[in-house]
Amino acid sequence: MQNPRQIAFLALREVHRRGAFADAALDRAFSNSQLNDLDRRLVTELVYGSVRRMRSIDFIIDKLATKKSSQQPPELRTILHLGLYQLEYLNQIPPSAAVNTTVQLAKENGFSGLSSFVNGLLRQYIRLTDNDLNPLTVTNYKSTVERLGILHSFPEWLVNLWIEQIGETETEQLCEWFNQSPTIDLRINPLKSSIAQIEAALKSQNISVSRIPNLPQALRLNGSIGAIQNLPGYSEGWWTIQDSSAQLVTHLL
């Protein structure tokens, strides 16, 4: 059985080592795997999330490890990213599972001698967060720009630009919005199916789906969904992908 975290590691290694785009690295990783849809969604979330939150995770490593993140062996740093991303941002994964699988990942990729370091760092992070001492939230930042940049994983020049244009409150809201998992909107084909039928079929595969107010033929897929072509109704033409903003135009007309 293939390990989804190992596949996520291989994709991230390509991103970090070769500068590959995350989507291209994911496609190549999936082409050599036979993961089920649930595991594909986990891999997708781990890869995109670790890239999206890289600055935040590096900051945690800098606070907890003797060596800064930039001084860690590159592949070990990638492994730490995967573990810390699960602990900080994926509430559905038990902390013990996140720690154990990350330690195993270190052992399987040439870092057996540092597996105790990986285990210790992740467990130290758990102890801190359990006592409301998360480094991301308790640090005395030098400025609002630094705080928002590290907390939301954006470069400070961009945060500073946004603050100048829209103010601090709106900038923080914008940072939070940009870090939300992407959604995909479906336009239902009422000649071939119904919104209730498609909604039930998607939920039966543990895909988070919600209706969109004022759009009677629209469904929104939330979070990672795996391969589009594997979704219920794809081959049957039950739906097409169309953003809700485009759907609203035709609905109003």
Image (cartoon, grey):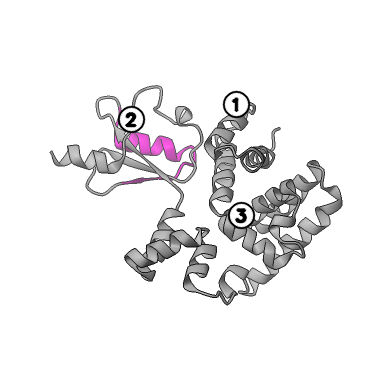
Classify 148 as above or below 41: below
Number of marks drawn: 3
Q: Which mark is first along the chain, 1 or 2?
A: 1
The crowd level at tag 3 (other Cα within 10 Å; few <14, some 14-19, many 20+) is: many
Between the residue at mark 1 and the residue at mark 3, the CA separation in whole angstroms equals 24 Å
Q: Residue at x 82, y 47 (%)?
A: 111
Give percent across and percent down for residue 132: 61, 74
Can residue 216 be seen here? The reply is no
Question: Residue shown at 65%/52% (left/top)?
Answer: 81
Q: Label 1: which residue?
A: 31
Task: Check the image and name the residue furthest to the top.
Answer: 235
Say what amino acid the circle numbered 2 marks.
Trp
Q: Secondary structure at mark 2?
A: strand
- Nearer the observer, disc 3 or disc 2? 3
Q: Residue at (67%, 38%) from the top-left corner?
A: 10
**How far is mark 2 from mark 1, CA to CA?**
25 Å
Residue 85 numbered mark, or none: 3
Rendered view: 191 above or below 48: above
Mark 2 — residue? 239
Question: Is residue 205 part of the magenta span, yes or no?
Answer: yes
Q: Are marks 1 and 3 in contact (CB under 8 Å)?
A: no
